[in-house]
Image: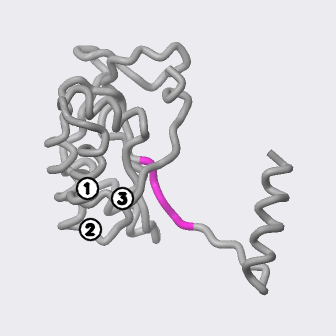
């Protein structure tokens, strides 16, 4: 990891004359913890029907976004479990609601979540990405360990 940091620093110094480091304030917002994947490493997920299982309604997500913006946040990372009940239309509606109400960068859905959404929605991965971008998706995060499952 130190080697990677050193390489990044060298590249940055070549591209900028000043020693500038930037950052953003963002927040991870989980829309659901219900997941069918059953990854052995995950302590986050719950099965459908578990007393701790949830799917957050838009207003709960909106409250979290409002808190983020009030603290200077410019981005939210929106992720959750592989919920068999949340198809493409759920995400399109959610993303549109977020973008209509907030001026915030929407960094959402891991590659594994996108593949899952394509599968249960019976559409292609390209269609999922296209439709989500049209609904307001700004960028996609790198995959976590679930991409290996």
Q: Name the secondary structure under disc 3.
A: strand
Camera-near label (1 vs 3) is 3
Contact between marks 1 and 2 (CB within 8 A): the answer is yes
Q: Which residue lies furthest to the bottom in this view?
A: 17
Residue at image location 22% in from the left, 59% down from the top = 134
Task: Report the quarter where the N terminus lies.
Answer: top right
Camera-near label (1 vs 2) is 2
Q: Residue 106 carries which label?
A: 3
CA distance for labels 1 and 3? 13 Å
Tell me if 32 is positioned left or right of 26 in this view.
left
Q: In this view, does 28 lie above or below 18?
A: above
Q: Is the magenta stretch mostly helix, strand or loop?
A: strand
Q: Name the secondary structure under disc 1.
A: helix
- Residues packed near mark 3 inside 10 Å, few (<14), some (14 to 19) or many (20 plus): many
Residue 25 is inside the magenta segment: yes
Percent coordinates x, y for residue 111 in the rendering: 42, 39
Tell me if 71 is positioned left or right of 17 in this view.
left
Q: Name the secondary structure under disc 2.
A: loop
* First to last magenta residue range: 24-28
Q: Residue 102 carries which label?
A: 2
Residue at image location 49% in from the left, 20% down from the top = 149
Q: Which mark is residue 62?
A: 1
């Amino acid at each position: 990891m130190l080697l990677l940091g050193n390489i990044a620093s060298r590249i940055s110094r070549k591209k900028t004359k000043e020693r500038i480091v930037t950052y953003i304030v963002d927040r991870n917002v989980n829309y659901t913890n219900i997941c069918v994947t059953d990854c052995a490493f995950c302590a986050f997920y719950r099965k459908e029907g578990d007393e701790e299982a949830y799917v957050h309604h838009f207003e709960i997500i909106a409250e979290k976004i409002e808190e983020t913006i009030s603290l200077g946040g410019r981005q939210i990372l929106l992720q959750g479990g592989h919920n068999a009940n949340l198809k493409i239309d759920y995400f399109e509606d959610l993303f549109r609601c977020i973008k209509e109400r907030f001026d915030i960068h929407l960094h959402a859905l891991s590659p594994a979540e996108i593949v899952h959404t394509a599968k249960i929605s019976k559409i292609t991965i390209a269609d999922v990405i296209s439709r989500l971008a049209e609904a307001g998706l700004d960028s996609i995060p790198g995959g976590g360990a679930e991409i290996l499952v």
